[in-house]
Amino acid sequence: MARYKHMDIGNGQGMFLTVNLEDQLLPGTFEKMLSDLIGTKIDISEFDNNYNNDETGAKAISPAVLIKLIIYGYSRGHKSSRKISELCRNNIIAKALSEGTEPHWTTIADFISSNSEIFQEIFVEVLAYCNELGLIGGETFAIDGCRIPSNASKELSGTKAELEKKVKAYRKMAEKHIAKHKRQDELGEVNKEVEHKFIERQKKLNIQISKISDFLTNMKIKEGRCLKELKSNVTDNESALMKSSSGYIQGYIGLAVSDDRDQIIVSAEAVGSATENEYFPQMLDETLSNIDEVEVQAPQGKKRTMMGDAHYFTEDNLRACEDRGIEAIIPDSQAKRRLGKDKEELYDVSDFKYNQEGNYYECPNGKKLEYKRSLVLPGNRDGKQYRANVKDCSVCPLKARCIKSRKKTNKSNNGKMLLITKSNEAGSLCRAMREKLKTEEYQDKYGYRMQIIEPVFANITYCKGLNRFSLRGKRKVNGQWLLYCIVHNLGKCLKGYNMVMGYT
Ligand code: SF4
């Protein structure tokens, strides 16, 4: 019978091993690249200003160690500071990156939450390295946002009136709780356990009451478009209640602009808002400033192009592109729905001719659409309504291309209604954009938008596991978002880095 050597590894005894930490970072791996780049190609000297222990005080854990550990942890799907700290004890790669130190999780958490501005600088440093490897085309970009919940309670959000109602409800609950306890006391049902439960519950209710009451005393009402009051949040008032694919969430939108060559993120920002279109000019400026700073070459004889989905289709955003000499490709929300019943393109506002003298529009069938009224639309926009005669429309041979839902029109017994707003009046950039996107050339170009930006969000949220920001406040959340974008960009550098180093 064959005999084998046996080693009892479950005997609870340790074993001394000789480990060279440097050897654990294998050439060709992400962690080797990280270890080589931080502090050399990627300058992190800005962190030195945070430390004031030249002459007195204990030696601090090096920021190079902390940033390497955090990036490594995030790249492996660990976003909790406790987990990253734990890795230093039981993961040999993390041990090598931390140079044998074991930073406490509070040190890691504090480092992440207090260095948002420096992360922005590191983001640009990483971008410069991406450019050095030739990963940035600098010609076509795409912008989009990803709604991510944050460390804020959805239940503690509401308008001023709603929050006042909530405090009242909690007070009532606390009163009822005391009354119930009194009754139990009279009946002699109170023992140690009941007493403990009562105290704990009462404590929780009092904390909620004082939390909301304190918030209400200093509350500044947030106003949205149409001057309507927006919901505030007691736990993190900079976050926003927003609709996402998985229902309503309390959180932030992680905005990113990605370059088309290798899906490198060229600018990133987390914003606490339910809508993202108003941040478009800001992201445009950030993109231009970042690519100028890292000296990305401008395309020869061509304009730079920025693509966005229908969320960004506003006159102001298109104007922002025009002013900066950037070609925008942004469809309106109706672009997909422009096909009628017979798969023919529906008539657009541009197919209706305006008669200034009579203040009416003439439809493709030569009928008049009379002015009806002026409206104030959401977003404080002005609109003018023109309507055709129902008798003309009911017998019109062009009806299928003019009125999308004939059923509805028949029900309300109305003719074609035309709404003229700033975005579709003659000469507007919105109208020009609609015309542009009717051409095959621009439709083809726009078809690439998803390929440029969507893999970025898939990588960050699915592969790296950022399904929730673990911090509160815009500044801190922005720092965490930037760190994830750095992880994404560094991941893209790996192939180029290995080629430069001769590892492949
Ligand atoms: S449906 Fe009415 S508005 Fe449209 S083309 Fe015909 S007559 Fe003109």
Image: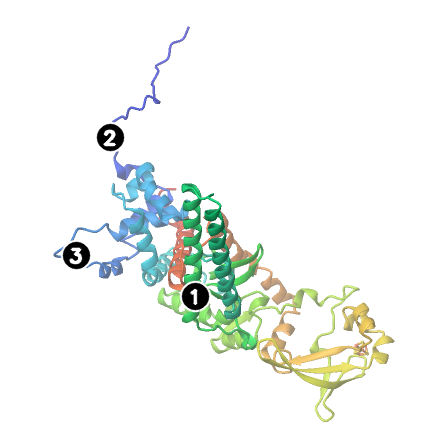
Q: Which residue is mark 2?
A: 18
Q: Residues within 10 Å of mark 2 (few under 14, many from 20)?
A: few
In-front residue for pair 477/236: 236
Question: x%, y% of residue 500?
Answer: 35, 48
* Amino acid under disc 3: Asn
Tally of numbered discs:
3
Q: Which residue is mark 1?
A: 213
Residue depicted at x 35% and y 49%: 70
Quarter containing ligand 1? bottom right
Question: x%, y% of residue 185?
Answer: 45, 48
Of badges 1 and 3, nearer the viewer stands 1
Q: Which residue is mark 3?
A: 53
* Amino acid under disc 1: Ser
Q: How was the colour assigned to the protein in this rendering?
A: rainbow
Q: Horizontal placement of 56 versus 244: left or right?
A: left
* Amino acid under disc 2: Thr
